[in-house]
Image (cartoon, helix red, strand yellow):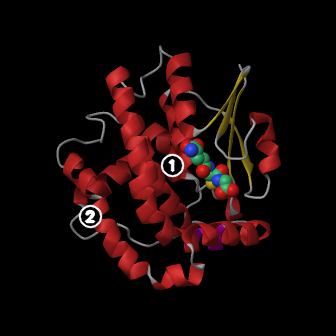
Amino acid sequence: MSLVLYERLCADDRRPSPFCWRARLALAHKGLTPELRAIGFTESEEVAFSGQAEVPVLIDGDAVVHDSWAIACHLEDAYPEAPSLFDGPGGRALSRLVNHWVDHSLQRALAPILSPYLLASVRPEDRAYYRRSRETQFGMTMEQLAVRRPALLEALHPVLEPLRQRLAETSFLCGERPAYADYLVFGEFQLARSVCDVDLLGADEGALRGWRSCMLDLHGGLARSVTAFETAA
Ligand SMILES: N[C@@H](CCC(=O)N[C@@H](CS)C(=O)NCC(=O)O)C(=O)O
């Protein structure tokens, strides 16, 4: 059975997309190893067969699935005998809530901090596109965002509070074992790790740091094994 995952490619072979990390970790959770096809920001025609322009896109036999949530649901339904990503319908519903929280609250706090670093990390031929699209989105230049970084980092602190509270109770967000909601949140930290050495966590965040480190070690150290900011050429 052919399994192919299209994901985002940046300079130095970096793979920073949090949406693609959700898919990569969900596949690993199910014990599946896809062939990876990485494309730059200006190569969206490579996934035009999926009817849209974004990654991740999964080809699983005859099925073409785009959108990280749709990919997680596809894997859960197509591979029921493998470890569950959601642990039942209630878990699927709550994972979707976490998905919305990450997309609308966590990313909103993180994206303006990380975008100037991502600009420096995209392939040279994608830089003009990336700058134009993100500056339109934020309504300010990358340089203006960089000046605001201290205030943006300050504003991130309360957004992380639900994670701190939860990780004071259990090893993973999903309980004693990681599952899809952990991957949803971790994708954002993996993006940060790929593009910068800014410490997003405060001095008192032992549990959050410990969780992040455990997430890097999961599935044979999959997330730790890829090029990070420190290891980039
Ligand atoms: N809702 C989608 C969002 C996917 C998404 O935004 N992917 C980014 C990954 S870098 C993308 O392809 N962006 C296209 C662009 O910025 O031009 C999902 O969860 O998969």
Q: CA distance from mark 1 to mark 2?
A: 26 Å
**Of pointers 1 and 2, the one earlier in the residue sequence:** 2
Q: Residue at x 73, y 70 (%)?
A: 127
Residue 5 drawn at (x, y percent): 67, 37
What residue type is disc 1 on? Ala
Q: Decide whether the magenta segment is chiefly helix, strand or loop.
A: helix
Q: Is residue 230 visible?
A: no
Q: Is residue 167 magenta?
A: no
Q: Is residue 142 found left or right of 151 in the rendered image?
A: right
Q: Which residue is mark 2?
A: 158
Q: Secondary structure at mark 1?
A: helix
Instruction: State the mark number for residue 223.
Output: 1
* Circle 2 residues within 10 Å: few <14, some 14–19, many ≥20: few
Query: Which residue of the protein is positioned furthest toward the left in this rendering?
Result: 169
Q: Residue at x 55, y 62 (%)?
A: 194
Choose mark 1 or mark 2, whichever is in front.
Answer: 2
Q: What residue span does the magenta drawing correspond to?
A: 117-121
Residue 66 drawn at (x, y percent): 65, 36
Residue 138, above or below 4:
below
Say if disc 1 is inside 8 Å of ligand 1.
no
Q: Residue at x 42, y 23 (%)?
A: 84
What residue type is disc 2 on? Pro
Residue 37 drawn at (x, y percent): 73, 43
